[in-house]
Amino acid sequence: MKLTDSVRAIKGIGEKSEKLFGKLGVTTVEELLAFYPREYDVYTAIQPIASVREGNTVILEGTFTERPRMNSARNLKIISCRLRDVSGQIAVRWFNMPYLLHSLKVGMRYILRGRITQKNGVLQMTQPKLLSKEEYVNRLGKLQPVYHLTAGLTNHMITKSVAAALKEYEPEPDFLPLEIRKKYNLIAHKKAVQAIHFPESKEAYAQARNRLTFEEFFLFSLALHRIKETKQEKTSDYRLERDELTKELLNRLPYTLTSGQEKVRQEIKHDLQSGKVMNRLIQGDVGSGKTVLAMLALLSAAENGYQGAIMAPTEVLAMQHYEEFMNYLSPLGVRVDLLVGSMTAAQKKKTMERIANQETDILVGTHALIQEKVSYADLALIVTDEQHRFGVKQRELFSDKGKSPHILVMSATPIPRTLALILYGDLDISVVDTLPANRLPIKNCVVGTNYRPQAYRFMEKQIQEGHQVYIICPMVEGSEESEAENVIDYTNMLRETLSPSVRVEYLHGKMRPSEKTEIMTAFSKQKIDVLVSTTVIEVGINVPNATVMMIENAERFGLAQLHQLRGRIGRGEAQSYCIFMAGNTSEETMERLKILENSNDGFYIASQDLKMRGPGDLFGVRQSGEYYFKLADIWQDARQLKQANEAAGTYTQKELSLLCKKYDGLRKKLEEYTGEVML
Ligand code: ADP
Ligand code: MG
């Protein structure tokens, strides 16, 4: 079986599963092997009942003290009984498994694996799996892969398919140069792929992860070094010197720029007048006011007779920028246009004509901006917002649209300077280090689920005062595998719980772009009071009237991500509140979340998060699922990032060409990565 074969070549995958795998972005054997587990399930040793704690998944062994009972609540059938060992007793409950009623025997020994939850202050084990002694012994200490799923495809099916593929595929020669593998102590690719799916031990997992994250970073760094070399000190055709309109816009803004904004504005202005091509990153915490800096730079392109474009990662965000730009720039006679995927073909065609004929000065849009068909008349500046969502390849595609246009990228992800210098190695970095002064700091609280009724009352009060609320849930819809809150059920529950006049809607990533846009627009126009959403709202949305955010299952998110989410509130002049709802109140969870309660500073939070987990914490929550890496996490794998960057930096372009000749696999990967041909 070759890596390029369709997944159909794998035993057990037919037409139906092929389609389902397709939904997960897996069509070839190679893609399946690179479909790394989301996390691992670890079977730990049987523990005494008296030692269990809320939130942990544990294995218990004991006998039932009484015959199981069955109750019906709403449309649920609940089986309850009590398990006893020498140390104590605990309540056990199963939902919708009525057949257990007669199969469970009093006096027999059972092994149960399940999560410990709390109800009315009492610990219980919910929905445990019954294990035979043999199953227990076989799985003890092993890491079981847990994959991202799609409806119809179970974890078991994916695990089986991966195992079958691993057995039968013909590996290609390792593409990492031998000298690098030796120097950084990296295991072979083939061995790493085997071990990332089925690690024999934590050490084996660590080695696999080390190798695979290194290779991701290595490719990334090589690509970046190449880009850097080709564009260093390039002279620019676009000297943007006129600034009458800029001055007028500054006068019209309803606020004055903060000192941080002003400093960065000067840096940008200097670049744009320098006669060299600008390559600049603006970093600034959420809400620090980066959009207006982009608007000023784009205006400068327009007033000097050229075009400028800004690309946002979501349609919702693009629409929002478009409206804001129209509002400020059209009175100055600047022509602003929008291009997003959900527009009709006719609308797109018209817009593209205007772009080509230079009837548009500033174009706002999504990925649509870099599609082949869009051709710009005279593009002098491109801006990418929330840069980390785009890969190197997309960044370059965008700049290919003009004759070496100036480049400005904006990111709200607070990363330490050392990492930023690597990740954005090809860019100069500006930091907006102030927040607008009219903001009241967000008030935070970390609470357990028993606080919910109070939280709802609080929300209703805020809504009565004319404000709006976000509620974040980790899942889109309910599933048997997860107890985490989901957007759909939560919305239905809220509609019944809150007073009927409160308008509750939901938003999640599986909705069509046009639906998402519609909901977001309605929310920003105050036609929705409570928006229940997954993390899709994380990026850039600006609705200053929203003053409350409640994050369900806050323990499931990385701290930096929680901070980004929280950045959606506290954007106006009214006091804002963020409620972190912890699905379990274990010491660990509470300690982690307290960091957010005590600080609103993104850089501080990110550094604390890193410190708390330490490099050994391999199974921690993924910090940001949003960077352009598959497995690697810039926080968790910071050491590999530094090493890979160092390794990539040792090759001159000529040496790299030679290396690509020797390691054909490397050439192919790099070409895939950068979208250009390596000579
Ligand atoms: P981000 O840096 O997260 O992209 P935005 O650019 O969306 O932040 O700005 C957040 C809000 O702050 C917007 O409503 C914007 O109008 C406002 N804002 C920006 N700069 C200032 C300022 N200097 N003073 C007051 N409000 C400002
Ligand atoms: Mg923004």
Image (tube, rainbow, N blue to C red):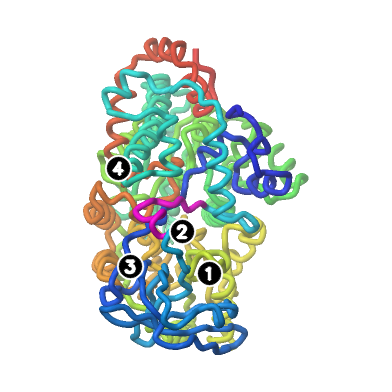
Q: Amino acid at mark 2?
A: Glu
Q: Which circle, 3 or 4, is nearer the viewer?
A: 4
For the question of whether residue 273 can be seen, the reply is no
Q: Determine whether the residue tagged by mark 3 lies in a helix, strand or loop.
A: loop
For the point 26% across and 23% down, the residue is 183
Q: Earlier in the sequence, mark 3 or mark 1?
A: 3
**Front in this rendered view, residue 163 or 534:** 163
Q: For the residues marked 2 and 1, what is the alpha-carbon distance in whole angstroms?
A: 16 Å
Q: Earlier in the sequence, mark 3 or mark 4?
A: 4
Give neighbour class at mark 2: few <14, some 14-19, many 20+ (Cα, 10 Å). some
Q: Is residue 140 magenta?
A: yes
Taking 119 as reference, is 491 above or below it? above
Q: Which residue is mark 2?
A: 538
Q: Looking at the image, is mark 4 or mark 1 nearer the viewer? A: 4
Pointer 3 residue = 439
Which residue is labeled 4 in the image?
A: 203
Span shown in magenta: 136-147
Quarter of the rendering containing residue 557: bottom left
Residue 381, image x, y percentages: 49, 35
Query: For numbered disc 2, what is the local secondary structure?
Result: helix
